């Protein structure tokens, strides 16, 4: 087709177009684009943009839910667990972790503390000291102060008192103080042989014999384990008066 014929044909086609109708269509397209670009697109982007996960560790369940909701996220309680350091009702764990980037609307799973485990304090009175220690260990309790005293009803080496008392509600790792019987008071008072014993064993032996512990001197030596009795002021086997004092010398590191 020749050039002038092409130009004439284009003129004929353009002349046949209804320009008013085309203008309306173009206006609709422009308006639709502006709505999409300025309204729908920002809404879509905001809906799927990443937000940091807030830290709700140690918060109460209600407080945690409010904080998570303010961030555009949803909280889901996943479970509960015993925790010795947190009171019941506090958040002990969260997933995802704090500061992680997630999409808005994401679920944040939390685990809530049930507090420390508690149970009834077992009876120790009447048990040998060794057995009482095993019972404490089995119940995840710790042995506190151990004292020794005369008891007319319980034999030597048996627990005669405890605190907390049996039947009390206690938590894991609670401290339990006990008193151990020294038995009945002897009718004669004989100095025991305590050389070579540990300091603790020596003190118990003197108490059991009805005698008083006097001065405890320290002597440096590498021949004995620390806190081993090296000598005693009164000879073993000697009969003495009730409450007589016995001084001891105990080994120490050089």
Image (cartoon, helix red, strand yellow):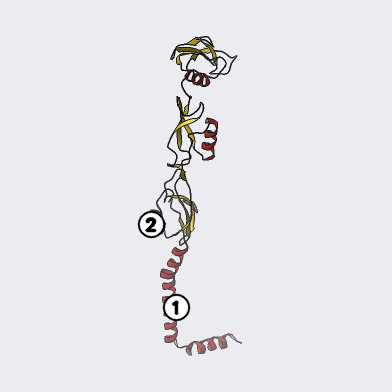
Front residue (pair 15, 86):
86
Q: Which residue is mark 2?
A: 66
**Quadrant housing the C terminus:** top right
Q: Which residue extends farthest front?
A: 187
Mark 1 vs mark 2, foreground winner is 2
Around disc 1, counting alpha carbons within 10 Å, would you say few (fewer than 14), some (14 to 19), or many (20 or more)? Answer: few
Q: Residue at x 44, y 80 (%)?
A: 26
Secondary element at image label 2: helix
Around disc 2, counting alpha carbons within 10 Å, would you say few (fewer than 14), some (14 to 19), or many (20 or more)? Answer: some
Q: Position of residue 145 (x, y in %)?
A: 45, 29
Q: Position of residue 228 (x, y in %)?
A: 55, 17
Q: Position of residue 229 (x, y in %)?
A: 54, 15
Q: Is residue 23 above or below residue 200?
A: below
Residues at marks 1 and 2 touching, judged by CB atoms closer than 8 Å: no
Q: Identify the disc placed on residue 77.
A: none
Q: Which residue is mark 1?
A: 29
């Amino acid at each position: 087709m020749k050039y002038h014929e092409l130009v004439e044909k284009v003129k004929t086609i353009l002349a046949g177009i209804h320009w008013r109708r085309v203008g309306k269509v173009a206006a609709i397209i422009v308006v639709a684009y502006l709505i999409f670009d300025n309204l729908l697109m920002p809404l879509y982007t905001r809906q799927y943009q990443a937000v940091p996960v807030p830290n709700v560790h140690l918060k109460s369940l209600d407080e945690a839910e409010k904080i998570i909701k303010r961030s555009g996220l949803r909280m889901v309680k996943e479970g509960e667990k015993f925790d010795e350091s947190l009171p019941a009702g506090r958040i002990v764990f969260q997933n995802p972790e704090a500061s992680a980037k997630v999409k808005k609307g994401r679920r944040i799973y939390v685990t809530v503390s049930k507090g420390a485990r508690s149970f009834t304090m077992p009876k120790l009175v009447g048990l040998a000291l060794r057995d009482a220690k095993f019972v404490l260990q089995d119940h995840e309790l710790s042995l506190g102060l151990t004292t020794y005293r005369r008891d007319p009803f319980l034999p030597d080496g048996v627990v005669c008192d405890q605190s907390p008392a049996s039947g009390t509600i206690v938590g894991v790792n609670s401290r339990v103080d006990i008193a151990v019987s020294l038995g009945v008071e002897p009718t004669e008072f004989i100095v025991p042989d305590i050389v070579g014993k540990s300091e603790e064993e020596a003190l118990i032996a003197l108490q059991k014999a009805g005698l008083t512990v006097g001065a405890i001197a320290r002597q440096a030596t590498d021949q004995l384990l620390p806190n081993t009795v090296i000598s005693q002021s009164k000879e073993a086997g000697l009969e003495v008066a009730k409450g007589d004092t016995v001084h001891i010398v105990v080994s120490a590191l050089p």
